Amino acid sequence: MGIPSQYEHLFSEPKNAELDEMVKAAVGKNSSYGEKMVAGLLASKNVHVQRDRIRQSIRRVDPDGVDTRKRVALHRRQYSVPGPNSLWHIDGNHKLIRWRYVIHGGIDGYSRIPVFLRCSTNNRAHTMLSAFKEGVLQYGLPWTVRSDKGGENTSVCAFMMAHPLRGPGRGPSLQEGVSTIRELKDFGEICSQYVLSSTH
């Protein structure tokens, strides 16, 4: 598969032998370097090569390293949510903080529907709770809420623990987890589009 002509000028065209030497030098620094790290090292030297060519070169230069990295690769757990409102992931996005915007949002883990999304000028717990309650009014109360340990989530935690249908003795209501980050991986893009569309 060739490169579309409009992108050809973006890539360097070292011969395979030259590329292999550069890759060998990069892998020699650290045997755990995979194609992304090697591509980054090459790019830092202003050598831009397609990932497919880098992958092939690594296989030629360091076949044992390829096998080792395959063996220690992370195996992700299967993500499974029983149904709508079983689990909401909530988080704040701070990518626009230099303009004094913080975006709070929540996503239903089953349907991946954004259940609330609010752009604010602060990152206070009551602001997150207010946005969360709007989502609850529209979609209903989730069985479980998953968040990171950020201070903006403390009021949501207190709300869920004090709610008569949730809280102690009523079943799950809160979880902390790093998978929140993975589930909200597109959150930043959604937030940026939201702010751009509301400011124009």
Image (tube, helix red, strand yellow):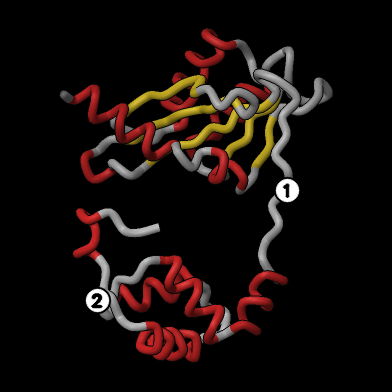
Which one is earlier in the sequence, the residue at label 2 or at label 1?
Answer: 2
Q: Quadrant of residue 162?
A: top right
Q: Amino acid at mark 1?
A: Arg
Pinpoint residue 26: horizontal percent, then vertical percent: 43, 85
Looking at the rendered image, the quarter that the N terminus falls into is: bottom left
Pinpoint residue 103: horizontal percent, then vertical percent: 37, 32
**For the residue labelled by badge 1, is the local secondary structure a helix, a strand or a loop?**
loop
Q: Amino acid at mark 2?
A: Asn
User: Which residue: 67% across, 61% down?
Assistant: 74
User: Which residue: 51% across, 38% down?
Assistant: 184
Question: Would residue 45 appear left or right of 103 to someone viewing this image?
Answer: left
Rendered image: mark on residue 46:
2
* Mark 1 residue crowding within 10 angstroms, few (<14) / some (14–19) / many (20+): few
Rendered image: mark on residue 77:
1
User: Which residue: 42% across, 24% down?
Assistant: 117
Pinpoint residue 149: horizontal percent, then vertical percent: 57, 44
Q: Quadrant of residue 32?
A: bottom right
What separation in Å lies between label 2 and label 1 (alpha carbons)? 37 Å
**For the residue labelled by badge 2, is the local secondary structure a helix, a strand or a loop?**
loop
Looking at the rendered image, the quarter that the C terminus falls into is: top left
Location of residue 147 with respect to 44 vertically, above or below: above
Q: How many marks?
A: 2
Mark closer to the observer (2, 1): 2
Location of residue 165 with respect to 37 vertically, above or below: above
Question: Would residue 142 appear left or right of 120 to someone viewing this image?
Answer: right
